[in-house]
Image: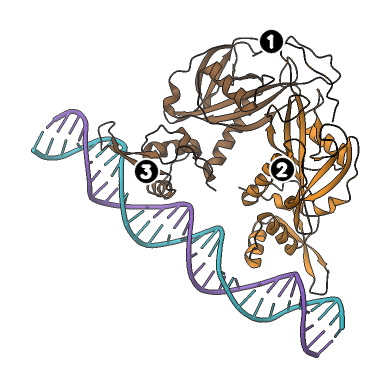
Chain colours: A orange, B brown, C purple, D cyan
Amino acid sequence: MRAPEQTFSYRYPHPAVTTDVVVFTIRDGRLCTLLVKRANAPYQGSWALPGGFLDIDEDLDACAERELAEETGLTDVYLEQLFTFGRTDRDPRERVISVTYYALVPQHALSTPRAASDAAAVGWFAFEDLPELAFDHAEIIDMAHRRLVAKLDYSTIAFQFMPEAFTLSELQCVYESLLNQPLDKRNFRKRILSLDLIEETGCQRRTGKHRPAREYRVKHPDRVEIIK
Amino acid sequence: MRAPEQTFSYRYPHPAVTTDVVVFTIRDGRLCTLLVKRANAPYQGSWALPGGFLDIDEDLDACAERELAEETGLTDVYLEQLFTFGRTDRDPRERVISVTYYALVPQHALSTPRAASDAAAVGWFAFEDLPELAFDHAEIIDMAHRRLVAKLDYSTIAFQFMPEAFTLSELQCVYESLLNQPLDKRNFRKRILSLDLIEETGCQRRTGKHRPAREYRVKHPDRVEIIK
DNA sequence: CACGATAGTGTTTTTGGTACACCTTGTCAA
DNA sequence: TTGACAAGGTGTACCAAAAACACTATCGTG
């Protein structure tokens, strides 16, 4: 993040504006979040969401993308605005308004993200087992999680967790770990297939000592979003 | 709104932050929005959403409430954050990030709002017949409307349009004007009553030359929000 | 070739949503 | 006084989507 040294003497002081990004993925059947270790004060050494200050001539979305890329190496991620946090005491340096985003990335995007710029380290953390977080970032992650679960019902965001080719069992695992409850296999497959959003690749996935599973892909990777 | 004269020479210039509020109500069976006529440049004389600059030690929600009260006289309104707009060119004066809110108020809150501070006039406008709007406020209202309609399905926000006591027919009118389609009376009443959120007041409403209607009230006015 | 492990498949039941028509109770005017 | 008008209020039959539920198929391995 940027240096906090400036103070304001203007008649109408302006707050700083940042973007922060909650990136979710599924690892080993567990929902995980991408965090960076802060290299600088405040909260030096603490884990925090990737994010940083808005450039004065930069769109909010672009800022979120840029900071995510700079601090974690993640690019081409579909970001959606989550909420804007602005408690007056949320940053000890100065007044900071944070416009937050969330994103879902497929498991294979895990290719260990590289730390860069003001991040001392980057890592994935199980949602159920997060470290102490800087600022109000725990609250932000919590809201992102609630939004994610709510959207499962009436949208198809879960596909965003999937790699290009996947099996129905894998998809079901994703739903189950997000909803935190088992689902009926037949009903699940019926429902997913009736959406008419995925198609067989023709290939099979042979893993383990059992019958191989059919692979599927999303039909129109562009518009995988709201249904209802 | 505040004077735009300042420019920044800091190493990291900060954008200005405003809040803007979309207030909806139902008037004569039509969805209406509260607008203020701008007293100052830019867009002087144009209609715009009530809103204004964030004080440096003020919470976002408080800013929205304060600006709404200052410019329209409306108080004690339940505000919900909508979205944050930040296109770099959305304000000709300087870079402005707007955290927007929306609110639903009952019809009787209509008591002609008073213009104040930098608003030259205040008025309700039918959503279907809005005037030219300043900044990107048309876009903001549009998003608020879509959010409102979407929430009708899985929440009970519509109750927020109702006065303390109301009849089922009145409530149905509200739903019909929001959804822009007629509803079946019996199904509607069945659905609403099955929510178990309202109760009879015991009183009757006698209007017009016909049978009086039973009055209802919301059981727990505090938690009238999300159902599902 | 038998066993273990996951893949894959249909039917029945339940439930929630939709469609639909008539009687009731008041006002008002002839 | 009474008949016409206007909105208030009520129940049932049908359909479609969701939930419950158990067995066979195919591969790897020992």
Q: Work out whether residue B126 or residue A13 is closer to the camera in this orientation and state it.
A: A13
Q: Amino acid at mark 1?
A: Ala
User: In this rendering, do the residues under marks 3 and 2 share a single chain?
Assistant: no
Measured Cα–Cα span from mark 3 to mark 2: 38 Å
Q: Which residue is mark 2?
A: A141
Q: Which residue is mark 1?
A: B3
Q: Work out whether residue B221 or residue A60 is closer to the camera in this orientation and state it.
A: B221
Give the foreground label among 3 and 2: 2
Q: Is residue B180 visible?
A: no
Q: Which residue is mark 3?
A: B199
Q: Residues within 10 Å of mark 2 (few under 14, many from 20)?
A: many
Q: Amino acid at mark 2?
A: Ile
* Contact, mark 3 vs mark 2 (Cβ under 8 Å): no
Q: Position of residue A124 (x, y in %)?
A: 82, 49
The residue located at (44%, 25%) in the rendering is B109
Q: Position of residue B106 (x, y in %)?
A: 45, 30
Q: Residues within 10 Å of mark 1 (few under 14, many from 20)?
A: few
The residue located at (39%, 33%) in the rendering is B164
Q: Secondary structure at mark 1?
A: loop
Q: Secondary structure at mark 2?
A: helix
| Lower position in the chain sequence, tag 1 or tag 3 | 1
